[in-house]
Image: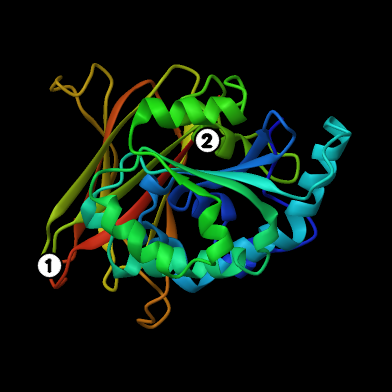
Amino acid sequence: MYFSIFLSNVDIDAAMGCPLSIVLTQYPVLYSGNAKEGYPVCYFHAGRLTVQGIECITTLDSIPKMMWNTMVYQVAGIFRDAAELNPDFVRCEQITVINLEGLSASQVNSRTLDVVKKANAVAECIPEMLYRCIIINAPSFFAVTWRIIRAFLDKNTSMKIELYSNKKKGQKRLTELIDENSLPSDFDGMGPSTQEILCKNSAKNGEAPPKRRIVELVSVKRGGGEGTLAFDLKPNEKMKLQVFTRSELGGHFSLYRFPEGLKSSNMTPVLEDFSVARSNNGEMTPFSADLVDDLTGAGEYTLVGKSEVKSKATEYFLVIGDVYE
């Protein structure tokens, strides 16, 4: 059973300043299924958290809004569903699983820790909800970071947290608590990946969800530098391609199709020098642009982003491609 984070009775998209489903590509957290003893399970793939990506679409101060939305509007329903599935489940507690796979030392900085602190501040308001927190795939350098994080955790909460750097030991512990078929594939289980679940849950108001979603944070060096993204479309597929950014000066995007593959010289321009620029008088708020609404044609593609010559720092552009059949 997979729970959707989207609710019709609260406009969380307006509060976040962009669709929540886009925020979750950079702060991937979701509830999915139940543990063997009935506890709802919350998964957080912290190794995929990117501060630059979050800032392309919203503000760091919006993360607590997202967490409060989950606590106030979603969690009660999840516990009701858990009780219906297992009449013996009578305690309003959950298991949280945090995957640090892919986390690099450069990601662990003061800004990332600030995001974690903001999210934790919400969770600390209801500490009794946590039954157990399992942190898996912790890299060796995380030991120092963990001491910092543990310092601002409630003592009782800290005692409920288990940290595993050994992949096999972490997997063994997870399968003691959660059936392997319920575990997402990117948490070493047999179920759909968290990315697949979030993609499925991204549809709202009865709309069909994307078949798959391409997500890439493209960094473009200052002074006219370039960044690229390669992807493919299969026969009968179509794509909506968007870009989100906080760039001060914006940039230019071109899209090329290689029907015979990227190594072929046969190339067709789809989009050339498309300007992505803010229209709010220079206010440093995120904005977005639709590059292509209905991209079709099987083959491989390359998207090229170029910064303005006057740009003085690396620019970040979050590219989202929703693929439909």
Residue at coordinates 67% horizontally, 48% vertically from top-left? 5
Toward which corner of the image does residue 170 lie, by quadrant? top left
Q: Residues within 10 Å of mark 1 (few under 14, many from 20)?
A: few
Where residue 44 sits in the image (x, y, percent)?
50, 46
Q: Secondary structure at mark 1?
A: loop
Q: Amino acid at mark 2?
A: Thr
Residue at coordinates 62% horizontally, 23% vertically from top-left? 179
Q: How many marks?
A: 2
- Quick check: 168 left or right of 230? right
Residue 323 visible? The answer is no
Residue at coordinates 52% horizontally, 35% vertically from top-left? 194
- Quick check: 88 left or right of 150? right
Q: Quadrant of the C terminus?
A: top right
Task: Return the residue nearer the eye: 123 or 75.
Answer: 123
Compared to 59, does 323 lie above or below? above
Task: Return the residue nearer the eye: 110 or 285.
Answer: 110
Q: Residues within 10 Å of mark 2 (few under 14, many from 20)?
A: many
Which mark sits nearer the N-terminus, 1 or 2?
A: 2
Toward which corner of the image does residue 33 lie, by quadrant? top right
Where residue 52 sits in the image (x, y, percent)?
33, 61
- Quick check: 58 left or right of 66? left
Residue tagged by mark 1?
A: 309
- Quick check: 237 left or right of 166? right
Q: Quadrant of the N terminus?
A: top right
Toward which corner of the image does residue 112 lie, by quadrant? bottom left
Where residue 188 sits in the image (x, y, percent)?
45, 25
Q: CA distance from mark 1 to mark 2?
A: 39 Å
Q: Amino acid at mark 1?
A: Val
Residue tagged by mark 2?
A: 194
